[in-house]
Amino acid sequence: MERLFSILAVGLLLAGQAHATEIWMFAGPHVDHPAPGWERLRTDAGNMWKPDAPWATVASHVSVVQFAPTNVDRATDDDLQQAIKDLKRRNIALAVGTGLLIRSDRCRAKTEAYVGQAALEHMLDKLLRNGADVKYVTMDEPFYYGHRDSSPTACHESAQMLAQALIQSRAIVRKYFPGAKIGSDDVIDASGPWIQELAGWADTYKAVTGEPLAYIHADLDWSEGAVRNLVPLAAVLKQRGVPLGVIYDADRFNNNSDENWSHNTANHFAEVESGLGVHPDHAVIETWVRYPTRMLPESQPGTFTNVVLQYIQRYQKN
């Protein structure tokens, strides 16, 4: 009971310190040949990069658009250039989310946190030569998959070893984009000790690399315990000056149609910001499943940009 009151007290304190939240969103260039299993999904993605594209309200509020490596790799140079040019015209910053732990004899884990050096450099080079100015690189859950993961190829490395390994990756990123800020997303579940481990990871990363994490984006399983853990997570990150992002998506039980995904995701940002009183520095609206099947228009329920519009209408005053 005492712990519950403490969590509520911190939540009320954070609610009283509400601030402007940056909106980050998933998007990407048109892709003619998507990966197997992703055909006929979000085929209107390329239409976003036209001046009269029907997402004007969303575009005027979004701070950052994040591309996935597969979208960059599979897009033609022309389609990638179109998206990059339009982001610049709209004054929207570009982020790329990718594994950043280099596979080597040290660890050859097969999870998304790890990447081959050649593949990483190919993606970064393709972005650079097509005119991108990558402002953010989001590491794909390096601490969870590098330290805690229990899959067969997991290496269970210490925070110190992981941070040391990331020095090489950071140097590769900065070779192409010297000004890029490097942050991370990571798993948040119902484990209380995990929050303290993440705080320790942020401390170790800063001590080893000489630079703090630019942000941590919380990837929740949307269990009740995981949502509650946003309160202590927000507190420990605030103490360290590390911005908190919350990835808003649907849980695994409600991601099987456009309508279910959209409704469940909107419920999640209401649960966090209205219910819990946590107002993240970044509201990160993403999908890594087949839904929603359309990006546009923002005015039509069930599209991806309509979910972003719902967030704006609820939590953005300007």
Image (cartoon, rainbow, N blue to C red):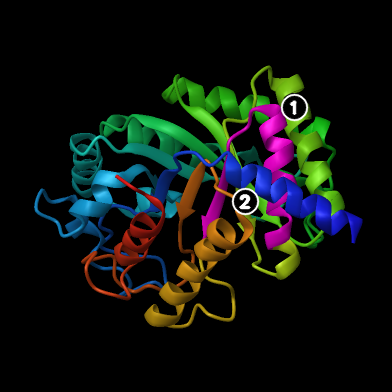
Estimate how packed mark 2 is, as few (under 14), some (14 to 19) or many (20 or more) residues with alpha carbons within 10 Å: many
Work out whether residue 104 can be spotted. Answer: no
Q: What residue lies at 76% left-to-right and 43% top-to-bottom?
A: 107
Identify the residue at image location x=81%, y=35%. Answer: 200
SS at mark 2?
Answer: strand
The residue at which mark 1 appears reads as 164
Task: Tell me: 219 left or right of 173.
Answer: right
The mark total stands at 2
Q: Quadrant of residue 251?
A: bottom right
Q: Magenta stretch?
A: 227-248
Magenta run includes residue 141: no
Between residues 191 and 30, which one lies in front from this camera angle?
A: 191
Q: Which amino acid is tagged 2?
A: Ala
At a point 50% along the width and 77% down the height, the residue shown is 255
- Answer with mark 2 or mark 1, whichever residue precedes in sequence: 1
Q: Is residue 136 above or below residue 151?
A: above
**Which residue is drawn at the image coordinates 30% and 62% (left, top)?**
305
**Foreground label between 2 and 1:** 2
Please state if 89 lies on the left or on the right of 143 as rendered. Answer: left
Read off the residue under disc 2.
Answer: 218
| Residue 47 in sight in this render | yes
Which of the numbered marks, if any, corresponds to residue 195? none
Distance from Cα at disc 2 to Cα at disc 1: 23 Å
Image quadrant containing the C terminus: top left
Occupied quadrant, residue 234: top right
Q: Position of residue 286 (x, y in %)?
A: 45, 58
Mark 1: which amino acid? Answer: Gln
